[in-house]
Amino acid sequence: MSTPRIGTLPSADRMAIFDAARRLKLDPYEFGGFLSLESGPNMNPNIWGGANDDYYGMIQFGRAERKKYLDPSKIGKYTRAEQAPKVVQFLLDRGFKPGEMKIDRAYATVLGGNPNVSLNAKDSFGTSVAGALPRFKKGGDLYENARRVLGDSPDIPSSNVATTPQQPQLAGQKDPMLMQLAQQMVQPLLIPLLQSPKPVGLSFGDFLNMVGTFGQ
């Protein structure tokens, strides 16, 4: 029996990242790999980086984005669970279309400001979507990092759970297997009973009804 991989992040943070990926209709490990590229292997919501270390959080919010999406009093104290919905809202506001766009366009939205920028365009550090994409696609190092820190997705059913559970037996409903077993046990007793005279004081109809109940 396989044991689900729990991951290394706090449960609430893991669930928030899985939920963000679900809302964006993205593979959670591609999404987690993209976050790992932006904010480190543990998807640190309080990391500073970028030009002049003036960018903050899981997707490196700039000054204008911090003012719009983040609470100034929580800067430096955010949890992943608190910041993940802000990431989703930023992407949606900038034109990312869940179900129509994939992880490359999500990263383009962060790197270039909207999902339709060239995937080959480079930022001030020489990073492009096309160049980084293999790292958070399946098989890439950041994809595998996301699998490690997030663990198994709650949307993936366990292989040990029956896919077609048996229906509960309703009140008054006869179990066919038990009925067959009962008939096998009672039949040898019925044969001599049927061959003997009916009990004294019992009508023939009552006798037949009594015998019939053994087969029900």
Image (cartoon, rainbow, N blue to C red):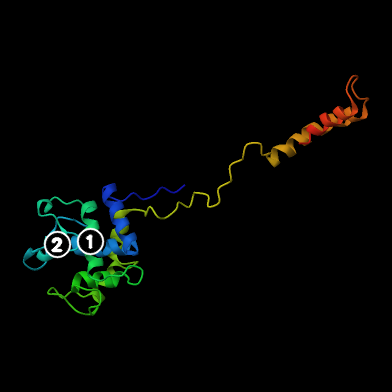
Quarter of the C terminus within the rendering: top right
Q: Which residue type does callout 1 highlight? A: Val
Judge the density around disc 1: few (<14), some (14-19), many (≥20) Cα neighbours within 10 Å. Answer: many
Say which of 185 and 145 sits in front.
Answer: 185
| For residue 18, above or below residue 101 | above
Left or right: 74 with respect to 153?
Answer: left
Say which of 132 and 16 sits in front.
Answer: 16
Residue farthest to the top? Answer: 201
- List the residue tagged with mark 2: 68
| For residue 207, above or below residue 6 | above
Q: Residue at x 88, y 22 (%)?
A: 202
| For residue 60, above or below residue 181 | below
Q: Residue at x 12, y 74 (%)?
A: 124
Q: Which residue type does callout 2 highlight? A: Lys
Residue 122: x percent and y percent?
A: 17, 77
Quarter location, residue 83: bottom left
Residue 54: x percent and y percent?
A: 8, 64
Quarter location, residue 68: bottom left
Q: Residue at x 22, y 71 (%)?
A: 109
Secondary structure at badge 2 equals: helix
Camera-near label (2 vs 1) is: 2
Disc on the earlier residue, 2 or 1: 2
Secondary structure at badge 1 equals: helix
Measure the C-alpha gap from mark 2 to mark 1: 12 Å
- List the residue tagged with mark 1: 87
Count every numbered label the image shows and give the total: 2
Numbered mark located on residue 197 in the image: none
